[in-house]
Amino acid sequence: MAGCEIAVRLQPRARANEIVGERAGVVLVRVTAPPVDGRANDALCRLIAKRARVGVRSVSVLRGAGAREKLVRVEGIGLAALRVALGVASED
C-alpha cells in the first residue's frame, strides 16, 4: 500500500482550518483547535484526511506531537498526489 510522509508546521487557535501553503519544504497548516489534549493534532489529521480523501485513521503524526513542527504520515496516497490534494504541488 502506498504511503508518504510530509513535514508540517501547525498553527493552533487560528480563525479557520486551512492549508496556507508551503515555506522551505514545510506545509503550513492552521487549525481552530487549541493545543490541548492533542486536539490540534486531531484537527490536523482530520483536515489532511479530508483533503487527501483518505480515512482519518490513515493519517498520523509520527514526530512532533507536542511541537509546531511535525512529521505526518499519510497511508493510501503517494507524495505527488498528496501535494496536489493539499494544494502545495510544486510548479515544475
Image (spheres, rainbow, N blue to C red):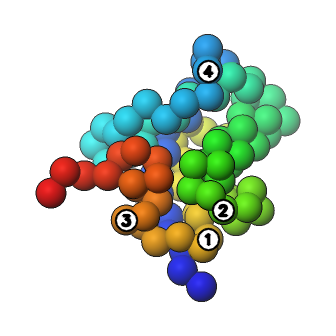
Amino acid type at circle 1 is Glu
Residue shown at 28% from the left, 43% from the top: 24
40 shown above or below 79 = above
Image location (x, y in percent) of residue 44: 65, 41
Q: Is residue 65 visible?
A: no
- Cβ–Cβ under 8 Å for marks 3 and 4: no
Residue picked out by circle 2: 54
Label disc, if present, on residue 80 of the rendered structure:
3
Question: How far is mark 4 from mark 2, CA to CA?
Answer: 21 Å
Q: Which mark is residue 21?
A: none
The local secondary structure at tag 1 comes to strand
- First in sequence: mark 1 vs mark 2: 2
Residue placed furthest toward the left: 92
Residue at left offset 40%, top offset 55% = 83
Which residue was labeled with disc 1? 75
**Mark closer to the chain start, 3 or 4:** 4
CB of mark 1 within 8 Å of CB of mark 2?
A: yes
Nearest to viewer (mark 1 / mark 2)? 2
Q: Horizontally, is 34 left or right of 2 in the view?
A: right
Q: CA distance from mark 1 to mark 4?
A: 25 Å
Quadrant in the picture for residue 1: bottom right
Q: Given the image, on which type of amino acid does mark 4 rest?
A: Ala
Which element is circle 2 on? Answer: loop
